[in-house]
Image (cartoon, helix red, strand yellow):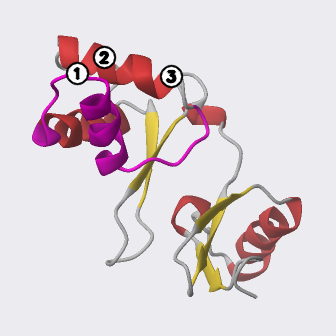
Amino acid sequence: MDSKPKYKTKQRETLLRYLETVPGTHITAADVYEYFRSQGTPIGQSTIYRQLEHLVDEGIINKYIIDANTPACFEYTGEKVHEDAEVCFHCKCEKCGSLIHMHCEELEEIGVHLLNEHHFKLNPMRTVFYGLCENCI
């Protein structure tokens, strides 16, 4: 993970300012593109994808890949927050496709158990529980 941005472009700064307004929110590259399009800000899709990947490399945003059929989600955490971010799990509804961002101490304990008892370190950023959300039950 690089600590310094490779390029400080106007589009990068515009994207960063937007991401700072939505901390803790899952967004896709398409969401970002649609936001800028609706604001009349000309940033191309390929630029958005490239800049999001740079920000992931720099540790400013997290990237979540849920499965092959779901676009990657990004979450702004900030430069200093990334290192100490709370453990986060995800639940995906198999009926409506909604993605639920979850902070749960009991699930964190599962990670501790797996490490201590089974010598396996769970990556909560890549852990997804599948089932039905409260709207689809």
Magenta range is 23-46
Q: Nearer the viewer, mark 2 or mark 1?
A: 1
- Count neighbours of disc 3 (C-alpha within 10 A) and say few if under 14, some if 14 to 19, many if 20 or more: some
Question: Residue 14 shows which numbered tag?
Answer: 2
Tell me the CA gap for discs 2 and 1. 9 Å
Q: Position of residue 74 (x, y in %)?
A: 43, 46
Name, please, the residue furthest toward the right: 106
* Residue 8 seen in this snapshot: no
Q: Is residue 69 above or below residue 74?
A: below
Q: Is residue 82 above or below residue 74?
A: above
- Quadrant including the N terminus: top left
Q: Earlier in the sequence, mark 1 or mark 3?
A: 3
The image quarter in which residue 122 lies: bottom right
Q: Position of residue 97 (x, y in %)?
A: 52, 76
Q: Which element is circle 2 on?
A: helix
The residue beneath circle 3 is 20
The residue beneath circle 1 is 41
